[in-house]
């Protein structure tokens, strides 16, 4: 996730530069054809095009709102993972006698979750934290985060039986694992259910068509200034489309994705400190981007 505003603007312009160069080249070609070669077929009325542009902008705004809702829901669900992980660690320390293997397994859980969501290799973090016996039992699982939750549930049941903890208190701890499973299910829903094609692809196609037709309409009024005016409007549509495209996939490896590695390291730090283990340092910001 971009945390430096100046860097963010540079990243946005760099990622959009290819489309902007093509737009400027097309605008220049149109103005040369019209001004020097007097192509009459370019005399398209401006009013219909302005109405079409307004409609496309409204459509893209709806798409962008939907994309941001996905991004923000993902961040909210990661907040639930953070809070419930901390609560579980506290309950293990204060009620279950501070079993370190359970706390360390919970510290491995967010790393396994970010690996499953973003197709990111977090195997080193998982191997470093997850107790070897648990790792062997869930080896080969398609859904490793769910396997870790299952192992945590078994450990809680074993320790509750050994300590003679009553069912109500046991159920309170198990409810935390259920809340984690619910948050994980919400994250998986976002991961496995992309925006409909009408939202993800159609706005880009319409914006590109509009940017192609725009200079043909504007050249009658702007003349040699057409590349400047048309490119400014084109920038708006290109950036609007790119914003929606960046936000609709909050878990993919990009500067605009959620900082899952940072959040997982934060959970790990809180849990390891609760059992007296030394945590790794926080993940630093690199080039204005938080991983």
Image (cartoon, rainbow, N blue to C red):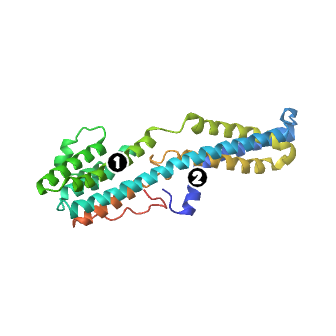
Kind of element beneath mark 1: helix
Classify 144 as above or below 165.
above
Q: Which residue is mark 1?
A: 113
Does residue 160 appear left or right of residue 171 in this picture? left
Mark sitting earlier along the chain (1/2): 2
Classify 73 as above or below 36.
below
Numbered tag placed on residue 203 in the rendering: none
Q: Is residue 261 visible?
A: yes
Residue 167: % across, % down: 20, 52
Q: Residue at x 83, y 48 (%)?
A: 224
Q: Which residue is mark 2?
A: 14
Residue 242: % across, % down: 59, 47
Where, quadrant-wise, is the C terminus in this rendering?
bottom left
Q: Residue at x 13, y 57 (%)?
A: 163
At label 2, counting other C-alpha atoms closer than 10 Å, the crowd grade (few under 14, some 14-19, many 20 or more) is few
Residue 36: % across, % down: 86, 40
Q: Residue at x 56, y 62 (%)?
A: 5
Does residue 36 appear left or right of residue 151 in this picture? right
Does residue 285 appear left or right of residue 266 in this picture? right
């Amino acid at each position: 996730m971009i945390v430096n505003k100046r860097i963010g603007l540079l990243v946005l312009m760099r990622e959009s530069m290819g489309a902007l160069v093509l737009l400027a080249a097309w605008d220049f070609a149109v103005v040369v054809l019209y001004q020097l070669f007097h192509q009459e077929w370019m005399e398209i009325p401006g009013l219909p095009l302005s109405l079409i542009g307004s409609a496309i902008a409204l459509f893209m705004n709806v798409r962008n709102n939907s994309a941001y809702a996905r991004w923000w829901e993902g961040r909210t669900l990661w907040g639930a993972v953070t809070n419930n992980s901390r609560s579980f660690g506290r309950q293990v320390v204060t009620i279950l006698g501070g079993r370190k293997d359970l706390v360390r397994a919970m510290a491995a859980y967010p790393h396994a979750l970010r690996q499953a969501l973003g197709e990111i290799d977090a195997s080193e973090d998982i191997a470093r934290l997850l107790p070897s016996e648990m790792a062997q039992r869930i080896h080969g699982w398609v859904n490793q985060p769910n396997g870790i939750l299952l192992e945590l549930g078994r450990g809680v049941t074993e320790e509750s039986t050994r300590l003679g903890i009553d069912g109500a208190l046991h159920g309170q701890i198990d409810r935390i694992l259920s809340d984690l499973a619910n948050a994980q299910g919400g994250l998986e829903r976002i991961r496995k259910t992309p925006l409909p094609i009408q939202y993800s692809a159609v706005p880009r196609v319409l914006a590109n068509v509009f940017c192609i037709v725009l200079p043909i309409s504007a050249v009658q009024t702007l003349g040699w200034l057409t590349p400047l005016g048309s490119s400014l409007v084109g920038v708006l549509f290109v950036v609007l489309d790119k914003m929606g495209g960046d936000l609709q996939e909050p878990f993919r490896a990009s500067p605009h994705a959620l900082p899952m590695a940072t959040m997982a390291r934060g959970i790990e730090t809180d849990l390891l400190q609760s059992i007296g283990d030394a945590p790794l340092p926080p993940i630093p910001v690199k080039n204005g981007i938080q991983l």
